[in-house]
Image: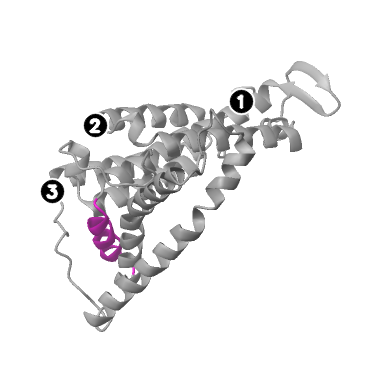
Amino acid sequence: MSSVFNYIKGKSPIHALTGASKLLVLVLWSLSAMTTFDTRLLMALPIISLLLFIASGIKYRDVSFVLNFTFVFMVLNNLLIFLFSPEHGVTIYGTRNVLWEGFGIWVVTKEQLFYQLNVVLKYLATIPLVLLFVTTTDPSEFASSLNRIGVSYKISYSVSLALRYIPDIQREYKEISVAQQARGLELDKKKESLFKRLKCAATLLFPLIVSSIERIDLVAAATDLRGFGKNKKRTWDSSRPFRKGDWIAILFSILLLALSIALNFINGGRYYKPFV
């Protein structure tokens, strides 16, 4: 089973950055992508993300499930945009260049296609970096990063536990699935229909929920016995000081956000309008 959100150990320059710096970069990067619809910048961000992915050593198969799910959601989102607002791009850019008359209200225009291209680029600009952050940041270090920027350590630790638990859920689901198939439950897509397989998969949820509840009780009892939450502050053994690479990454992200904001003034708004 492909990993969903799982830390993958490595020795790349991306792994070497502290969790706090990567979190700040992610926030600044996301703001840069969200605050503008300038196509030139949005085309550059996915290219940089791809280069960072290559530098991290993370393989496609490690994040294939999330990427495939994102692709399906992206296609569905664009389809719904066109179905419910086929001339939204015309409203934004103020011109109307028809490529295909279509039928009814569904007319294909250059402006609409250009707007939806920008929507796709926003996905490509942010999702890969989110995956890169999750797969290259140790959950404990991620928790210390959240606490370092002002988030309560109780919430930070809860996030850390959730990230650590995702691989365990995947493993338990696979073990339960194998055990049930050994008892005659058929989940092979070559032998059963999709509806039948979904119905059989639903029967795996009950033992998975039961084991999850037992694990939650165990973790809650262990943290209570250790006095977790008694003090207002705590220390982190995974926390690391910023180094040269961290400051370079943060500075680059700040410049990227500054460029995104500057483009809003240069373009007279969030949208880059090549049709004017």
Badge 3 element: loop
The residue carrying mark 1 is: 114
Badge 2 element: loop
Judge by depth and name the residue closer to the eye, 123 or 263: 123
Q: What residue type is disc 3 on?
A: Arg
- Relative vertical location of residue 192 with respect to residue 152 in this rendering, above or below: above
- Inter-mark Cα distance, 2 to 1: 33 Å
**Lower position in the chain sequence, tag 2 or tag 3:** 2
Query: Mark 1 Cα within 10 Å, few/some/many (few <14, many 20+)?
Result: some
* Count of numbered circles in the view: 3
Q: Quadrant of the N terminus?
A: top left
The residue carrying mark 2 is: 57
Q: What residue type is disc 1 on?
A: Phe
Can you give x and y, in whole percent of width and height, for residue 171 in the image?
A: 34, 49
Residue positioned 58% across, 33% down in the render? 192
**Lower position in the chain sequence, tag 3 or tag 1:** 1
Badge 1 element: helix
Within the magenta stretch, is there residue 143? yes
